[in-house]
Amino acid sequence: MMTEDRLRALYGAVSPRAAVKVLDRLDSHCRAFVGGSPFMVLGTSDGTTLDVSPKGDPAGFVQIEDDRHLLIPDRPGNNRLDGLLNILRHPQVALIFLIPSVDETLRVNGHATIHDDADLCARCALRGRVPKTVLRVRIDEAYLHCGKAPMRAGLWAPDSWPSDRPVATLNEILRDQVGIAPEDLSQQAVEAGYRRTLY
C-alpha cells in the first residue's frame, strides 16, 4: 500500500526552490501572467466528486480585483452548472492559467463565491454581453509551475501538431455516444454553430 513515506522514498525531497515558491497573494509577475492569459482551467469539487472546466476569452478576461482576489465571469455554456453547483457545496477551487507560447503555467488555489450583483457583472461585460454571475476567488496560494509538461507535450510547437483532426467531430461523437446529432455531422457545421453562439 502506498504511503507518504513510500512516495518520498521513491521521489526524494522537494527541491528547495519549489518548497518556498508558494505565495499567498499575487505579485507583479503573477499579475502579468493573469493579465496575459486568454485561457484557464477551473477545478472544483462538491466534496466527493471533482470537475474541471475550461474558461477562455481575450487575454485578461480574469480580472484582478486586488492582490488577494480574482474575478472570473461565467460565460454562456450548456447550463449544466457543474462547477457553480460544486462551489455552493464546497468553495475550494484550483486554477491553472496558460499563455500561448509560454511553457510555464500559473497555479492558484483559493476559495470562491458566486455573485450576481449587477455592478460587478457589468464590470466583466464583453462586447456588450454581461455575465449572469461572476466568481470572486480569494487567493490562498499562487505560484508558477515549471514548463516541462507543455514542452514534453509540444503544446506550443506547431511542427508537433497533427496535420489532420485526430478525433471525430463533436456532432459525430454526440451521435455515437447518445444518439443526438444534427443532420450535418461535419466540422464545418460544428464551427458554424460555435460562430452563432459566440459573442
Image (cartoon, grey):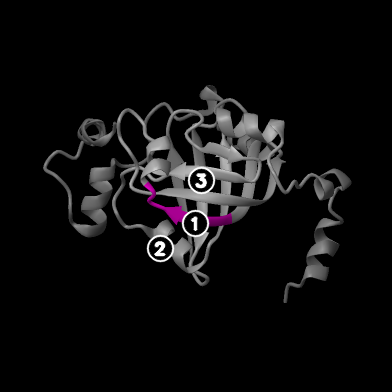
Residue under numbered circle 1 = 113
Name the secondary structure under disc 1. strand
Mark earlier in primary sequence (2, 1)? 2
Earlier along the polypeptide chain: callout 3 or callout 2?
A: 3
Mark 2: few/some/many CA within 10 Å (<14, 14-19, 20+): some
Q: What residue is disc 3 on? A: 41
Q: Give amino acid for label 3.
A: Val
Q: Is residue 169 above or below residue 42?
A: above
Percent coordinates x, y for residue 125 in the rendering: 37, 34
Q: CA distance from mark 3 to mark 2?
A: 17 Å
Which residue type carries mark 2? Answer: Leu
Residue 196 % position (x, y): 21, 33
Which x, y percent locates residue 131?
35, 42
As drawn, the label of residue 85 is 2
Q: Which residues are magenta?
A: 111-117
Marks 1 and 3 sit apart, C-alpha to C-alpha, by: 17 Å
**Is the stretch drawn in magenta largely helix, strand or loop?**
strand
Q: Residue furthest front?
A: 119
